[in-house]
């Protein structure tokens, strides 16, 4: 029996998440779902962006689908980002960000990379302080344990992906203690697993340039939380942009699928949100948490077919409902 916590969140999350849930129900008859709250709207109602009940249910059920979160542009007393809270409270220490060429939306057809982002540390620990009136300080945390866990995930994924190359991305020339520890810890785990021939390194600025110039040369990338956030967003251009980018937050026995796009308040309620990122995030949940690669491939194929079919239509006609219709039709034929 498969169980899923459904957290629509804010804005278009409430429109795209139900589409992904219906696709999962087509692939997993009998899927049990429970609706939960998190996000900015939740904070305005309850004074917390992630209620304790949401954390408890996710721990119990083990799988979740989170839609989108709105965040204020400045500090709000008592508020902390819902997705950061979920990642840290549930120890979702790995963030998977695949980028591949998608039919009808990608500008090239040779990109297929997987970015593994450490998901709990770096500047995202949220330790900031004032030093007098004119200076602020943010602390960056990098630990051997978190770095080794990330590399161990790469080792676990290598047999199914068969990577041509595993690239460690850092800035150890400027940050020799934090980035140096990250690089050396990851490298030792990969080398101990017999993958040393595949391992190379890039400084983060060089990696950014090469992801623009020659993305086809990358396969698996391992990096820290902040660098992973930036590089995965940059690389998403080759998969149609942030609006189509999927991700999966993974911990021990627990996973939270999350389309990368935001809450998009400018189009919320118009029926124009593309649910492809939520659908592809659900496919990651199928493949990496429930270990159902055939069902994941079916869902990805259905999304690809729908995007290819809709590519020739004007943007105004590519509605949420139409994308869902095409995906479900293809799922029915493929099944």
Image (tube, rainbow, N blue to C red):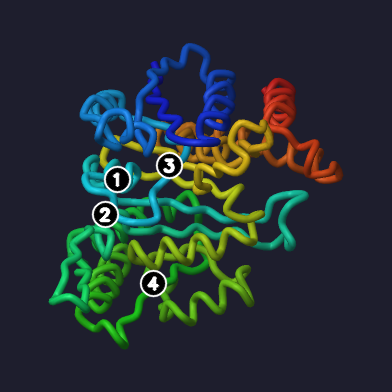
Displayed quadrant of residue 106 = bottom right
User: Residue under circle 4?
Assistant: 168
Residue 51: x %, y % from top left:
25, 30
Q: CA distance from mark 2 to mark 4?
A: 18 Å
The foreground one among 187 and 132 is: 132
Quarter of the picture holding the C terminus: top right
Q: Judge depth for marks 3 and 1 and give the one in front.
A: 3
Mark 2 or 4 closer to N-term?
A: 2
Mark 2 or 3 closer to N-term?
A: 3
- Which label is found at residue 120? 2
**Residue 191 in the image: above or below residue 41:** below
Q: Judge depth for marks 4 and 1 and give the one in front.
A: 1
Residue 235: x %, y % from top left:
56, 63
User: Residue under circle 1?
Assistant: 87
Q: How many dots with numbers?
A: 4
Q: Is residue 326 left or right of residue 113?
A: right
Residue shown at the point (34%, 62%) measured from the top left: 225
Specify few, some or many for label 3: CA neighbours under 10 Å numbering under 14, 14-19, or 20 or more. Answer: many
Q: CA distance from mark 2 to mark 3?
A: 18 Å
């Amino acid at each position: 029996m498969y169980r899923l916590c459904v957290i629509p969140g804010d804005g278009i999350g409430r429109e795209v998440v139900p589409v992904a849930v219906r696709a999962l129900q087509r692939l997993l008859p009998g899927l049990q779902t429970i609706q939960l709250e998190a996000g900015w709207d939740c904070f305005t109602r309850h004074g917390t962006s992630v209620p304790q009940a949401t954390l408890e249910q996710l721990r119990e059920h083990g799988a979740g689908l989170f839609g989108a979160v709105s965040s204020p542009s400045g500090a709000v007393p008592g508020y902390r980002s819902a997705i950061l809270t979920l990642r840290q409270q549930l120890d979702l220490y790995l963030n998977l960000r695949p980028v591949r060429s998608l039919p009808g939306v990608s500008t090239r057809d040779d990109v297929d990379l997987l970015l593994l982002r450490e998901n709990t540390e770096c500047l995202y620990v949220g330790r900031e302080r004032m030093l007098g009136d004119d200076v602020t300080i943010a602390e960056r945390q990098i630990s051997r344990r978190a770095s080794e866990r990330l590399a161990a995930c790469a080792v676990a994924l290598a047999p199914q992906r068969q990577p041509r190359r595993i690239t460690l991305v850092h800035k150890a020339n400027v940050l020799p203690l934090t980035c140096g520890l990250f690089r050396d810890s990851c490298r030792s785990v990969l080398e101990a697993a017999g993958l040393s021939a595949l391992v190379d390194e890039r400084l983060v600025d060089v990696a950014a340039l090469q992801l623009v110039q020659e993305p086809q040369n990358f396969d698996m990338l391992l990096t820290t939380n902040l660098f992973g956030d930036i590089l995965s967003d940059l690389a998403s251009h080759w998969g149609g942009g942030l609006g189509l980018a999927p991700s999966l937050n993974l911990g021990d026995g627990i996973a939270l699928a999350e389309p990368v796009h935001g809450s998009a308040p400018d189009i919320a309620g118009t029926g124009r949100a593309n649910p492809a990122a939520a659908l592809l995030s659900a496919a990651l949940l199928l493949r990496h948490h429930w270990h159902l690669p055939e069902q994941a491939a079916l869902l990805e194929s259905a999304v690809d077919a729908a995007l290819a079919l809709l590519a020739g239509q004007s943007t105004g006609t590519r509605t949420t409902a139409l994308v869902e219709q095409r995906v479900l039709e293809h799922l029915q034929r493929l099944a």
